[in-house]
Structure formats: C-alpha cells, structure tokens
Image: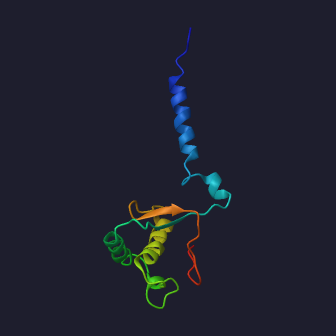
C-alpha cells in the first residue's frame, strides 16, 4: 500500500521557504549581516518628496535639514534614504517602490546610519 506523502512534502517545502527568507533569517542576522533601506534611483521624485514631507511629521528630521550631519549632498535621494532607513529601523518595512534593501552601509563622512 502506497502512502500519500503530499501533505508532508508541502509542509516541508513551505517550511524551507520560511527558513530561507533573507530579511527574516535570524541565523544571518546573528552572523553580523546588517541591512539598510535606501532610496531607489528609479523611484518617482514626487513620491519621494511626499514620503519626506509625511515622514518628517513623524520623526525628527534634523539630521537631513541644513546644518545636519546628513544634509549634504542636498538631494532627494540622500534625504529619502536617511528617512527610509529610519522607517525601516522603526517598523521593519522598506517602502516598496521607493526604496530597496542593501547590505552596503550608506553612511558617509559624519552621517552615520544605525
């Protein structure tokens, strides 16, 4: 008599998918791999500006304002990257269509991302 192993196979498959998810994989995070959310160069500049306007109502954006450590270079991609990463740290979400996850630290000069 042949047993139907399909349910066991499906459970194993979905378990493997869950364990291999890079963003949620604690094994990778425990190995010191860090992630940042940065602005996508292909994102709509108007959508990035709207994100900045709304986001700075929720967070202290002084680091990306004139005189702040992350102000220069003065541009929407740099400022949006800082705020996207701030949201990523707070809510574990990288805004789809605006940013993407990277393992390259975007910090520069005196501007340090967490």
Q: Residue furthest top?
A: 1
In the figure, 69 relative to 45: above or below? below
- Please provide percent x and percent y for residue 48: 36, 71
- Please provide percent x and percent y for residue 53: 34, 77
Q: Determine the image quadrant of residue 103.
A: bottom right
* Left or right: 18, with 99 as reference point: right
Quadrant of image for the C terminus: bottom right
In the figure, 98 relative to 57: above or below? above
* Left or right: 38, with 112 as reference point: left
The residue under the point 44% across, 66% down is 40
Count of marks overlaid on the render: 0
The residue under the point 51% across, 30% down is 10
- Please provide percent x and percent y for residue 91: 46, 64
Q: How is the image coloured?
A: rainbow
Q: Residue furthest right?
A: 31
- Please provide percent x and percent y for residue 38: 48, 68
* Left or right: 39, with 110 as reference point: left
* Left or right: 28, with 72 as reference point: right
Q: Determine the image quadrant of residue 80.
A: bottom left
Quadrant of image for the N terminus: top right
Q: Residue furthest front?
A: 42
Q: Residue furthest bottom?
A: 67
In the figure, 66 relative to 83: above or below? below
In the figure, 36 relative to 20: above or below? below
The residue under the point 56% across, 75% down is 113
């Amino acid at each position: 008599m042949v047993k139907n192993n399909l349910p066991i196979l499906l459970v194993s498959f979905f378990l493997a998918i869950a364990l291999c998810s890079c963003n949620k994989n604690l094994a990778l995070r425990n190995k010191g791999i860090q992630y940042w959310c940065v602005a996508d160069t292909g994102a709509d500049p108007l959508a990035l500006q709207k994100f900045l306007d709304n986001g700075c109502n929720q967070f202290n954006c002084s680091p990306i304002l004139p005189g702040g450590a992350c102000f220069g270079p003065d541009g929407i991609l740099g400022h949006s990257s800082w705020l996207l990463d701030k949201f990523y740290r707070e809510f574990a979400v990288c805004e789809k269509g605006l940013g993407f996850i990277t393992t390259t630290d975007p910090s520069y000069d005196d501007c340090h991302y967490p």
